[in-house]
Structures are given as C-alpha cells and as structure tokens.
Image (cartoon, grey):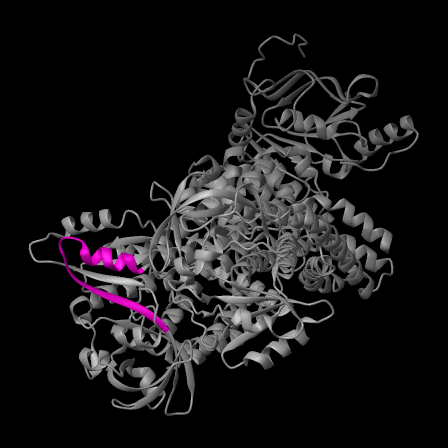
Amino acid sequence: MSTAAAEAPAADGVAARARGLTKAYGAGETAVLALDSVDVDIARGRFTAVMGPSGSGKSTLMHCLAGLDTVSAGQVWLGGTEITGLRERELTRLRRDRIGFMFQSFNLIPTLNAAENITLPMDIAGKKPDEKWLNQVIDTLGLRDRLGHRPTQLSGGQQQRVACARALVSRPELIFADEPTGNLDSRAGLEVLGFLREAVDQLGQTVVMVTHDPGAAAHSDLVLFLADGRIVDRMEGPTADAVLERMKRFDVGRGSAGPEED
Amino acid sequence: MLKATLRSFLAHKGRLMLSALAIVLSVAFVAGSLIFSDTVTRTFDRLFASTSADVTVEPKQDLKSSVPTGAVQTVPAALAGEVAKVDGVADTHADVSVQNIVVVDSHNKSVGPTTGAPTIATDWYLTRRSPVKLTSGHAPQGAGQALLDADTADKKHVRIGDTLTVQAQPGTFKVEIVGIATFTTTNPGAALVFLDPAVAAKELLGATGRATSISVDAAQGVTDAELKGRIGAAIGTGTYDLKTADEQAKSSAADLGGFLDVIKYVMLGFAGIATLVGVFLIVNTFSMLIAQRTRELGLLRALGADRRQVRRSVLTEAVLLGLVGSTLGLGAGVGLAFGLIKLMSAFGMNLKATEMVIGWGTPVAAYVVGVGVTFVAAYLPARRAATVSPMAALADAEIAGVGRPLRTRAIVGGAVGAIGAAALAGCAAASKTASAASLLGLGVVLTLIATVIAGPLLVRPVIRVLGGAFPALFGPVGRMSQRNALRNPRRTGATAAALMVGLALVGGMSVASASMSKSFDQQIDKTLGADFVVQNSNFLPFTREITDKVRGTEGVGLVVRQRFAPVAVRLPDGKRVTTTAAGYDAQVDEVAHVAYKGGDTAAALAAGSLGMDVTFAKDHKVRLGSVLPVEFQGGKRAEMKVGALTDQDSSGGFGTQGGLFFGIATVEKYVPGGQDSSLYVNRAPATSADQLRSRLEKTLAPYPQVQVRDQADYKKLVHDQIAVLLYLVYALLGLAIVIAVLGVVNTLALSVVERTREIGLLRAIGLARRQLRRMIRLESVVIAVFGAVLGLALGLVWGVCVQQVLALQGMKALAVPWGTIVAVVIGSAVVGIVAALLPALRASRMNVLAAIAHE
C-alpha cells in the first residue's frame, strides 16, 4: 500500500481510495477526530464490510468516500477521479451517476412507486435505464410483481430490496450500504445480504457496507475494523464468530460499549 | 402539563411565526379601524358640540334627497327677531350658510377641497362657538370682500389681496380676500369663505331678508330643551325644524358619518379578509405541528396523559399564540390608526394624532378576534391530537391525518354546496330585487363554505389535471412535485383555500363590474342621443350661469336641461314613496331615446303630468292616466296625472326609484331656485362636433367643476366610477394574497421540515440543488393555481348570479372579463413561485448528512 498522497493511483482493481483521510468535528481544543489519517483501498468487484464500535468513524468513512461529507485533510479518489476538492454540483453528479446508496431506513420516496423509485437516479440524470439490465435487476431481486406499489404498501424487506435495485440499476462503480439490515428482522436481513452478495458475485458490482452486526459482516469478502478513527485490523473471508471475537476485544479495550449512534 | 405546553410553544416559535403574523394583520385592521373611527367620532362630536347653537331653527327638512338638487331652503331672516322675543332667549342670529357654491382663483382653478368635502360660504359672525378666529387682515366689509380659512389659503396659495370668484346660485361675484380665519377646532376638511353679514343673504341666496337658519342663545338658567319647547310654541313646529345643541351636533356628525363609515367598513372588510384567510393558515400550521409531533403526543399519552390533557395542551398553545398575536396586532393597530390620521391630515382633515382615542372596546375586540380566531382554528387539529394513540410513540407511524377518509367532508360539503347552489339558482330565477339579493348573499356564503369543506376532495382530480403535464415537462422533478401536492389533500386544500377566498371575491366582482360597464355602455348607446353632456364630475348641480353661458355659445343648437327634485308620491296601493324625480325640457326626445310602453314625451312633460317606469307603475298599481298626489320639498303639493310609462330599458340608468320625470317647468313651479344637474347639448347645423367641443370648453373654462363629455367620455366616466369599486376589491385582494402567500410559504416551509429525510435521500442519490428548488417551486405553483382555479370558478358563478340581480334593475348585459381571469391565473402561478422562494432555498441549503439522519 503506497503512502505517497500526491501520487495518482492506478485505477485498475481499485474502486475507491483514500489517503491521509482526516475528518475533524469542532475546532481547537474541543476538536474531535472522527477519522485520523486513514489510508484505504476498496477493491473493485468485492464486498467490503466496515465494522467498528460506536463512534469509531465507520459511517463518517463511508460518507467521505461517497462524497456526502467534506474532509478536513487528505484525498479521496473514486476510480480515477479525485473527489476531494470537487464542488457541490460535481459531487451531486458524481453521486447520481457513479455511486449507489442504501440506507438503514427511509430509503424510498413515499410518493413514488417501486418502479419509479428504482429508476429515480437515472430519471434525475435524464438517462434511459438499460432495459435488459433493469429487468435482470428486478428479477434478481424478485420485485416483478411489486413494481406498481408505493413504499407504504411494501414490507421493510421489500423496501430494502427496492433500494438495492435502485442502487444497482445505474451500474454504479460503487454501492454504499449504511446498515442496510439494521431495521429488518433476521430473515429479511439475510435476504438483503444475499442480494448484495449476488450483486457482487453475479453482477460484478462493488459493495461497501457499514454494519455493526457480525452476522452481516460475515457475508462480505473483507472486513475492515475501525477504532478511534483508524483502521486497526482487517479480516479476509470472515465468519460471524471470528468477527464477533474480534469485536469483543474492542469492548474489552474500551471498558464498555457506548450507546449506539449510527 | 402546562410546563410541557410552554416548552413546546417556545420550541415551535419559528414555525408559529407566520400564523402569528396572520393574527397580527387581522387584529391590526380590527384595532386600527376601531381606534380611527373612535378618534374621528370623538373629535367631531366635540367639534359639533362646541359649535352648535343652544337652539337652531331650520326650514323643515321633510324630503331628504339622495341626489343633490342645488336648491337651498330658507327661513325669513325676520324670524330671528320673532324668536328673540321668546322668554329665555338671550340672543339670536340669522345665519346664511350655503354649500352649493364653487370658488375659483384667478387661474380658474377651484380652491375647494379635492376630497369631496364641501366648500361653504357663510356670513362672518363671531360668537363664542365659532370654530374659527380672525388671525390676519380684517373682517369683510360690504360686497366684494371675504375671508378665507387658513388651511385652504395655505393649500391653494391664496394670500390677502388676492381676488377669488364665487359662483353662487344667484350669480357669480368676485371677492377680494381681506383676511384669514384660522380654525380653533379640528378642521373637518371643508373650505370656508366668509362674507359680510350685510350682503351674504343677497349674494348667496339671491334675496335679502332670508336666512338658512336661526341660531339662538339661551339665557342663563334656561335649558336647551326648555327653550326649544318655548320657541316651538311661539313660532309653530309645522314649518320649522328646531334642534337643541345636542340634536344639532348629532345630526351634523351623522351628515359627516357617511364618509367616515365608508372608511370604517373598508377597514373592517380588510380585517374580515385577513381573519378569514388567517384561519386557514392557523388550521394548517397546527395540523402540521401535530402531525410532526405524533410520536411526542403518543409518548405523552403512553406516560399517562389523558385525551383531554393533550387537547388542552394544544389549545393552550393556540391561546398563547393568540395572546401574543393580539398584543402585537393591537400595537400595529395603533400604528395603523396613526397612519390613517396622518393620511386624513394630508387630505385636509386635521385630526390630532395625540388625541387618539383607544376605547375599552378596542383591546377587547382585538383580543376576542385574535384569541378567538386562533382558538377556533386550532380546535379541530387539537381534537385530532387527542385521538393520537399511545401506540404512536412506539410505532414509526405514518404521519397522522394523511390517510383518513374524507367522507365526512364529502357529505357535509355536498349538502352545504347543494343548498348554496339552490340558493344561487333561486337568485337567478327570482324576479324581485330584494329576494334575489338575499338569496345571492346566502348562496355566496354557503357555496364558499362548501368549497372550503370539500376543497380537499377536489385536490386529487383538479391537481391530476393541472399537474398532468408536469412529468412530461419536468421529468421526475415534475412528477414528485405533483405527487407532493397530492400527498395531503387536506393540507393542500386548506392552503389553496386562503387564495381561493380572495380570488373568488375578485372573480365575482370583476364579472359584476364588467357586466355593469357593458350594461351602461349599451344603455348609453341606446338612450343618449345628445352630442355632448355638460355635467359636474360628481353629478352635483351647478350654477345657473353655466346653463346661460352654454346656451349662448356659438354653434350650440339645442340645450336640454335636467334638474332633480326630491318628491314623495302617494301611490294607489297605499304606499308613500320618497324618491328623486327629474325635470327635463320639452325637446328631450332630441337628446335621448326613450321607449314608452304608453304615452309619449309630450304627455309626460305636460304641465301637471309626469312619466314613470312601467315596472314601478305595475308594482304599485299605477295606470296610465292615474292621478297621484305628489309632495315637493318645501311643502308644496300637487295632484299629477301619469302621462307616460317608460320601458325599463331606457329609464335613465342611474336608477332613482320609480324613474319619475316631468317637465322642467314643474320643477320651477314647485321647487323654485334649483340648479341644473346636466345639460344635453346638440350642435347647430354646420358646426362640427370638434368645433363645438372646443367652443364649449372655452366657454366653461371659468367653471372647473363641470366638464363637456361626448358619448365616449361619458362611458369612460361611468367605467371610472365602476373602477373605483374595483380598486377597493383589488386592495382587498392584495391583502388576501399577501396572507395567502404567507399560507403557502408556511405550508411549504413546514412540509420541507417534515420531508427533511426525504430531501436528504434525494440529494444523496444525486438530485441537484437546482432540481430540488424546482421541485418545491412546482409544488407551490400547482397549489396556488389550484386555489386560483377553484376561486375563479366560484367567483364566475357568483358574478353571473350578481348579474342576474343587476338585470332586475335594468343592467341586462353579461360580460366575463376573460383577460382579467387569465391574468389572475398567471398571477397565481407567479404567487406560487414567489411563495416558494424561501422554502426552496432552505431546502436546498439543507446539509445532506444531517437531513438523512433527521428524525
């Protein structure tokens, strides 16, 4: 892993990259470092999970990588594009065209039906979705008979599947999923994780998922562990038990777990 | 619980601000109009109380005329001597005071007030009650000298030594201003010219030994009432009206009252509109606050608060809002009254702002309106708050009120609307003006209520159509804005209702006034055959000289005079009708096209005959040839034969009741000394219209009060007068729109807050700020246009019904001002864009992350 910040990264095999990524809240003595000079590469075509105790900075890392939040120092690239320093309008376009999002809850626009929600980013961009791909996504997620439904008429799991379809449909370079199973029961959660897995394995997508559930993290290819704004560990081919064990060590180290925030 | 309420009130103060502003506006208008009219009333009561003689003897005023006739009623000046002999009389004076004059300066410009207040010429006779004192120069001595009041002199730049021309009924004379008299009391806005008492009667009344009234001073220890009784016993009450100082003050104040009442009613109209529109705003605000607080209310209920407590907490919040709004509104009302008083001063009515009267009624009314309206408006939302179940605290519930069925609204709105529609239909079918008008009023109120109630039901179908092209035109942004407007029909309905009320009013009034204009045009085309009409701009009669001068102008062929006389007729059905009749010269057929159902012009204008509107005749069982007893002003009576019946379509237009008319000789005979109100002039052969016009204008140059008008000018004059009414309506509309805009801003702002997460999500997945702003703007436009369409539709129906009522009075044409209506719809779209400015800006500035994380 190279540490030269100014060096243009090779785009090949890396979907997103951060160098010296620092995010501070507040100023002066009271400043809190949410991210402390993080270097990270997100490999293309893989399912990466970001874990860590509350307040470790895992959500902030995702927000900074996705161009949702500004950074205090350091650089972030999406593919070959440096996004730090981009203006608001360019960031918006970047999010629209090159990134897919799934959030924990409130993923869908309540006034639009499932089909309209799925194509919304492309509609906003004024682009026609690729019909073949769209159909493939819809069928993969089993949403064919739900397309005309409004979000209120869908179950929580179905809503997350629609959100997943929306994230996939524009074939983004990167899909960010922020606690996508946080509000679901275990069966619906498993289903959604299965789809994310499928998106990576069969559709060749790149997924970054923030979670605090070791079971969810076990579906990923690689788990990055954050603590106090730094990447402290990584685990290839994780299992739920191994992740849980690793997480327990954080709790011991800290004395006790703080209240859940993200 | 109270503590929680207070906290909540303070926490939401930003969101309550626009509601508070609406309350402030309505309370300000209520308080302002009350303070203003109290101040004026007090000022003039004092003025007239201090200037009225202990007892005043006046000619009997048996027939009050709505149309001024120019005739001055008098009493013999010798009556003063007679009254002086009555026991208990200290002093008497024969007053000469007339208002039927025009005073012009050397440039032929009137020095009179431009406000419609009178120019008064009177004899210079100082008593302790005089409202003026001589401040420079000397008292007028003999003919050719006069004093002018200081305010007029100041305003019109008249100085001592200047010469003014007084056009009085007996004739025009010149006076030199020899002194200035200054008001020691409030100047009600009139212009005053004082003449030497020795010549006043001759100059102003055309006869020595006459007076317009006798002022009587009571001796020490004699009450006014006592003295009035004694004088009445001595001179008889049959021919004279006797008034004590109190009675005189009251009647003077009442004379002035008409003008001031107009101001008061206009202000109350504003207050009414502000209140009505404000109610919608408050209802919406509280509904939204409660919707947003569903979980919080659920928590309160889960913690053991009962329904009554929840309801009471919301209502307490409303009362607090009302109290704050009323207090601020009261202050704003004082400012408004102050401004009005200053404005009146600019027009010459010198009210003193320092003597502002704030009666106990004003704050009471202010708080009753402010708190009452807020309480009533918040009641329904409060009841809804009370129905929030404790479960709402736990569930991530859909916002309350969105999904509830609108069945009750449909039923109530439908029922009220049906009754209202029936009333309007009845109004359209009615044949009597009085019943039609009351049905119209009922119909207007009921259909308005029905539309407000059923408005939310109309949201879906109407906005589907209005916004139907949005997805095609504006893509997903258009689709979302249309759906957002449809999202909560109650909210959209109530927001649009504020705009609807004002626009319905405008729609109705513009149809009515366009129809009136068109009717008058048709009537003028149909009836007016004269080349020119010479008339005072305010239809007041003018000095006889003008008639003589017009007759003497080169190129004038025919002059037909019109003169009004108040009369009372006893009709065969036993009714006694007091109205104003018109007298015409015999050649009236040459200048007007009158259609008769029976008889002809000659028969109507013959001595001892009169003409009458055929409908009026039918209503009162009058037939051609009936003989009716007619009373004239001044007490003369005559038996007159009905010589002709006119078809309604051609009877004048400025409909005096019954459309009575007779020969001008009849007026001269029974009401001598009247002035002409209009001259219909035809040109002589070989004179062109333009030639005659310029000659007439030259002739009439010294008389700035009268104008020469041809048909086109005449139509314009009528249109202008109707337009005055419209301006008032537009002012009301302006206020309604301001508040409606506040309402739309309010709704959007609160909606933006409510949809924070949604907006955050949209921004996260790539909606640009510009697109977000457009989405909110389009929603705003669709709401505003929805309100406009609803309002205009309602207004058009009202306007057509108003026209039906007018048709009963002869105004038969129906005109729909499509231009105005299209302009209003476009204007409403602009209103929508303006209203969306701030909420859209606010939404686009939202921090994406904070918005996503928003609870």
Residue B370: percent from the left, percent from the top? 69, 57
Question: Residue at 32% across / 78% down in the picture?
Answer: B660
Please give the name of the residue rendered at 42% of the width and 76% of the height, measured from the top-left corner: B634
On screen, residue A66 versus residue B416, left or right, reads right
Question: Total number of numbered labels?
Answer: 0
Q: Does the magenta stretch include residue B559?
A: yes
Name the outermost residue toward the left.
Answer: B686
Q: In the figure, B545 relative to B846: above or below?
A: below
Left or right of B327? Residue B482 is: left
Rendered residue at 34%/83% (across/down): B616
Q: Give the range drawn in magenta.
A: B544-565
Residue B463 or B635: which is nearer the viewer? B635
Which of the image's four quarters has the C terminus of chain B? top right
Residue B665 % position (x, y): 26, 74
**Residue B545 among magenta residues:** yes
B826 displayed left or right of A71:
left
Towards the viewer: A234 or B582: B582
Q: In this view, does B726 lie above or below A210?
A: below
Drawn side of residue B621 relative to residue A94, left or right? left
Q: Can residue A97 be seen in this view?
A: yes
Report x, y in % for residue B401. 65, 60
Along the viewing direction, whichever of A32 and B76 lies nearer the viewer: B76
Residue B710 visible? The answer is no
Give the farthest residue toward the right: A255
Where is the N terminus of chain B found, in terms of image quarters?
bottom right
* Residue B385 % position (x, y): 73, 61
In this view, A214 is above or below B608: above
Q: Which of B754 and B765 is in front in this view?
A: B754
What residue is rendered at 46% in x and 35% in y?
Answer: A125
Identify the image quadrant of residue B100. Answer: bottom left
